[in-house]
Amino acid sequence: MTRARLAGLVAASLTVTLSLAAFAQPPVRLAVLPPRDGSLGAAAGRIEAALVESAQALPGFVLANLAGTKLTGLKKGDAKLDPQPSGRALALGKETSSQRAVSVEATPLGEGLVIYLQAVEVPSGRVLGSTTISLAGGNTRAPHDRDTVRAALMRILDPGRYNGRLQIRLDVQGAEVQIDGRPSHSGLVELPVGTHALRVTHPAYHDFLRFLDVEFDKTLPVDINLAAYPLAEGEMTENQKRGLPSATRKPLKWYRTWWALSLAGVAVTGITVGVVWLVRPGLPGADSSTGYNPNPTP
């Protein structure tokens, strides 16, 4: 067995071991403070339902304060009287032996709702992150509630997994892909949520540049059709006439390549200019006629 093959087997075994170890890790216990603000009215039910559905759909987390389809609140202690939702959420996390806790503040705004979420690490009390989202429609549940809240929870609980994907499809071989100025590859590419610059270059094609918005847990397909330069396009057409695949195409003869054609064009232009200059009127050697009278009459 060669060293390269042995190293490959060791790397593959290590990858499998790490994957199994990650899969074997127990889920993180999560406590979510229920929105029980009396000013919300019926909207509190919509927010709570979205929180439950979203938290249950988060990979690697398990709701620690779920009873049926409802979130349970604090059961004892003076922490129930804490005016700050973050303080009550932290106390709820300790009461339910959770590692993470999320506080929820919601405010009706016009026909919609504005919701402020904050995540804390229960053992240390450290704030992990916060975000604000809006739900349109007031008290009425909407199909997008789950996805909107789920993305917000992942953003504040585990920013490293707050990602989306690009599915990059190229129509030519040998193109170089760059994302945000760094080398990348075609196919499926995972990226943080946000706007990214995609650039594709090839010596025989015009550059491709687009700014793309990546959304959480969604795949954006990108079909890249590069536009060839005119001379390069002629060479590719010749290869296509031969019926050869890209990987086995033979180079054109030197006198049919773009650079040979360009040099020939320059040479023809130079010769034409020289001929015109030599035969112009008034130069020695040019065809001309004139009259001569040695004795002009007075």
Image (tube, rainbow, N blue to C red):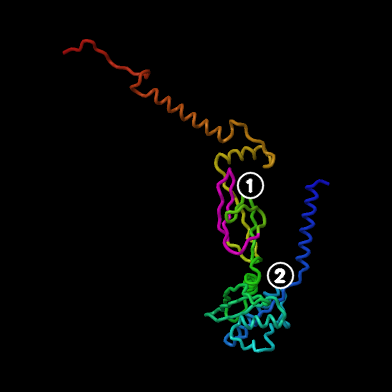
The residue that appears at 76% across and 69% down in the rendered structure is: 25
The quarter of the picture where residue 53 lies is bottom right
For label 2, the residue is 59
Q: Residue furthest right?
A: 1
Query: Residue 153 in the image: x percent, y percent?
Result: 64, 73
Disc tally is 2
Magenta stretch, main secondary structure, is strand
The residue that appears at 55% across and 78% down in the rendered structure is: 112
* Residue 203 is covered by the magenta coloring: yes
Say which element carries label 1: loop
Magenta segment: 190-212
Query: Residue 285 in the image: x percent, y percent?
Result: 37, 18
Calculate the distance from the C-alpha at mark 2 to the C-alpha at mark 1.
Answer: 37 Å
Numbered badge on residue 99: none
Numbered badge on residue 172: 1
Check disc 2 and give the amino acid type: Pro
Query: Residue 119 in the image: x percent, y percent?
Result: 63, 75
Check disc 1 and give the amino acid type: Val
Above or below for 242 versus 129: above
Above or below for 129 versus 187: below
Say which element carries label 2: loop
